[in-house]
Amino acid sequence: MPLIVGTSGWQYRHWKGMFYPAGVPQHSWLEYYAERFASVENDGTFYRLPDRETFTAWRQRTPEGFVMAIKASRFLTHVKRLKDPAEPVARLLAAASGLRSRLGPVLLQLPPTLAADPVRLSACLAEFGKKAPAGGRVRVAVEPRHESWWSEGTQALLAAHGAALCWADRAGHSQTPLWHPAGWGYLRFHEGDGRPWPRYRPSTLRSWLDRIKRAWPDAEADVYAYFNNDTGGAAVLDAAAFAELAAQAGLAVSG
């Protein structure tokens, strides 16, 4: 399977001197990043949705084949709590269309206080289907964080919309069931269990590779993996280590 590995964000000032050389200006960090990783998860879009011109500029600054996943606006997930999704979904996809072929999955990270509401989630996922570019599709990964979502009904709902359950790790422990309702996968690493904190132990990374191989034995299935443990540049180091371990395990790795 193609394993697409990257980090959650790239504009961390504390990465200067650790990942970004001192001589590389901040306005060139995306280009430097894209030379080393094939994908990034843009979590900045959660806090403020840029205009289409900004997404277009990101496309122009990255090479062909680069993929940018985007985190849906907190207005949709945390303020509206998925209610009345038509306008915020349309606005999100209209802006993100500037990425064209660079557009990767959209992540819906739900508030930890949002209990299961299958009607709202189904309506929201349906809007992504309606607003997809002509002749195209938008992949959506959902990261629920309230235990009431862990039901057969949720699993069936995701499968009906072709949406992935975002697998999430914290301190080496899965925060979600290991469902794989779609023909592709999405995995987020929030905090490692190694030293120095918040690095991941190689054994933990290997265990996740084993789970991925069992869930998606199809060599054509895309699996996106992003490291969100940015402190001290741990995300960069762990993303590189994960990609190397995946290659050693015989997986096709992008970047």
Image (cartoon, helix red, strand yellow):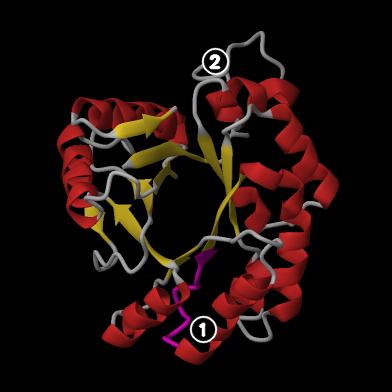
Provide the major secondary structure of the magenta segment.
loop
Image location of residue 146, percent across then percent down: 38, 77
Which numbered mark, 2 or 1, is in the foreground of this view? 1
Residue in the foreground of this view, choosing between 22 and 178: 178
> Label 2: which residue?
17
Q: Amino acid at mark 1?
A: Ser
Image height of 120 relative to 54, above or below: below
Q: Residue at x 50, y 22 (%)?
A: 36
Residue in the foreground of this view, choosing between 69 and 29: 69
Image location of residue 140, percent across then percent down: 51, 64
Residue in the foreground of this view, choosing between 39 and 150: 39
Image location of residue 194, percent across then percent down: 23, 36
Chain-order first, disc 2 or disc 1? 2
Circle 2/circle 1 CB separation < 8 Å: no
Which stretch is magenta? 108-117
Q: Residues within 10 Å of mark 2 (few under 14, many from 20)?
A: few
Is 73 left or right of 217, judged from the image as shown?
right
Image height of 225 relative to 81, above or below: above
> Label 1: which residue?
122
Which residue occupies the extreme top position in the image?
Answer: 23
Q: Residue at x 27, y 37 (%)?
A: 200
Image height of 209 relative to 129, above or below: above
Q: Amino acid at mark 2?
A: Gly
Residue 106 in view here: yes
Image location of residue 8, percent across then percent down: 51, 43
